[in-house]
Image (cartoon, helix red, strand yellow):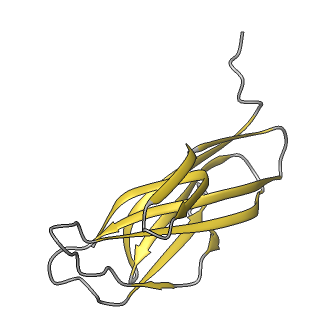
Amino acid sequence: MEARLLLIADFANVDSLGKLNIIGAFNHIYAPQFPVQHPAMYLVVRIGAELGEFNQEKNLTFILFDEDGNEKWRTPELKFAVPSPLGGKTGEFNAVVGIQQMMFEHPGRYEFRVYINGDQKGIIPLDIELGSGQPQA
């Protein structure tokens, strides 16, 4: 299994037909002061399966680390299986995890690491800085 798409967005969902909808992908937050509480973000991962990996139950976990390698947050294990593709389609599974009111104590580089059955499959970087995010004159 591999993570084919990894990102953070202002909003994301998977519709009833399985289409992944993403609005406002980002990897940078500017904060006027610290600690800062970010109102909402969505972690998005598209997982691809290879032959022989379909219909097998797996566990997906997201863990947030700060720049010192300290674990700051994690999801419970999310169970999923990539269904067998039909008619030449690709075997993929889309996962979206919404996070409300996440607190960041200090600026720096953070990473959401993505694990499937305990094996790291990718990293979503997130830089948090003091400032307004406006260009300097």
Residue drawn at the location 58% of the way across and 83% of the way down: 76
Residue drawn at the location 77% of the way across and 30% of the way down: 132
Viewer-nearest residue: 107 or 102:
102
On the image, the x and y values in percent for residue 79 come to 46, 86
Viewer-nearest residue: 25 or 85:
85
Task: Using the rendered view, name the quadrant where residue 73 is placed.
Answer: bottom right
Residue 36 versus residue 83 in the image, above or below:
above
Viewer-nearest residue: 11 or 104:
11
**Residue 66 horizontal side relative to residue 112, left or right:** right
Viewer-nearest residue: 124 or 71:
124
Q: How many marks?
A: 0
Task: Using the rendered view, name the quadrant where residue 131 is placed.
Answer: top right
Residue drawn at the location 61% of the way across and 75% of the way down: 74
Residue 111 versus residue 135 in the image, above or below:
below
**Quadrant including the N terminus:** bottom left
**Residue 87 horizontal side relative to residue 97, left or right:** left
Residue 93 versus residue 20 in the image, above or below:
below
Residue drawn at the location 15% of the way across and 67% of the way down: 88
On the image, the x and y values in percent for residue 136 come to 71, 15
**Residue 62 horizontal side relative to residue 45, left or right:** right
On the image, the x and y values in percent for residue 42 come to 60, 59
**Quadrant including the C terminus:** top right
